[in-house]
Image (spheres, rainbow, N blue to C red):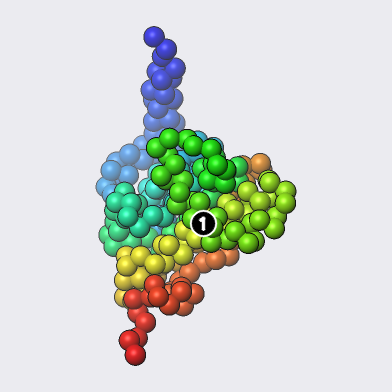
Amino acid sequence: MENSYKKLFENNKNWVNEQLSKDPDYFTDLANGQTPQYLWIGCSDSRVPANEITGTKPGEMFVHRNIANMVIHSDMNLLSVLSYAVEVLKVKHIIVCGHYGCGGVLAAMGNQQFGLIDNWLRHIKDVYRYHQEELDMIKDPKARANRFVQLNVIEQVNDLGKTSIVQNAWAKNQPLQIHGWVYDINDGIINDLNVTFTNTNKLHEVYRFDKKQE
Ligand code: CO
């Protein structure tokens, strides 16, 4: 039987010993609870490990990952993570981090069927349609894909801002910033797209719950 999984247990024991040699109270402290400042919404891609690329340790980052780092407002998993992170953990920053070379984004650009996942990719195809004019003008397929990755992140940041969870936190003056980043798998660098929201001001008004009724 293929048993490459066994090395994961060995790695785990080595890691435990390493932590304990640095700090004997490491696990006792972590067992007392978590107070992460960040919620990370990233891609499931194995090349984009949230903690490793941001130098954060266990306890510092609450993490949600799915294919192409999507914020879909009917996704109970995303909504539950978001609600817990904002309302209970009171994270100060939510980061949507996409990455260049994202298989989900590339698949969504094409016309091939992939099976069940096509239903997920359709949300990404919608983003293409919203930005078709800009994207179709980029002739180089790689440059077009990279811009699509960025636009997809920006769209997801907007989608976060549209949620009642985020807007209710802002209405209570709870400090909460939502950011859009892109990780470059070619050099390991995270780029800030500078689309940070700290209130509803930049949201399309039809999505604002704080808009005064005339
Ligand atoms: Co990806």
Q: Could you tell me which residue is drawn at 58 percent across and 61 percent down?
A: 131
Q: Quadrant of the N terminus?
A: top left
Q: Position of residue 41 (x, y in %)?
A: 44, 51
Say which residue label 1 marks. 127
Residue at left 64%, top 61%? 134
Q: Residue at x 55, y 66 (%)?
A: 195
Where is residue 152 drawn, in percent x and y? 53, 55
The quarter holding residue 89 reads bottom left
Q: Is residue 55 visible?
A: no
Left or right placement of residue 98 versus residue 87 in this view: right
Q: Is mark 1 within 8 Å of ligand 1?
A: no
Which quadrant is home to the C terminus?
A: bottom left
State the residue lying farthest toward the right: 140
Along the horizontal axis of the image, is 214 left or right of 115? left
Crowding at mark 1 (Cα within 10 Å: few <14, some 14-19, many 20+) = many
Residue 154, placed above or below residue 20: below
**In this view, which residue lies farthest toward the bottom?**
214
Tell me where residue 149 appears, x and y as whole percent: 57, 51
The residue closer to the viewer here, 152 or 1, is 152
In front here: 177 or 1? 1
Mark 1 lies on a secondary structure that is helix
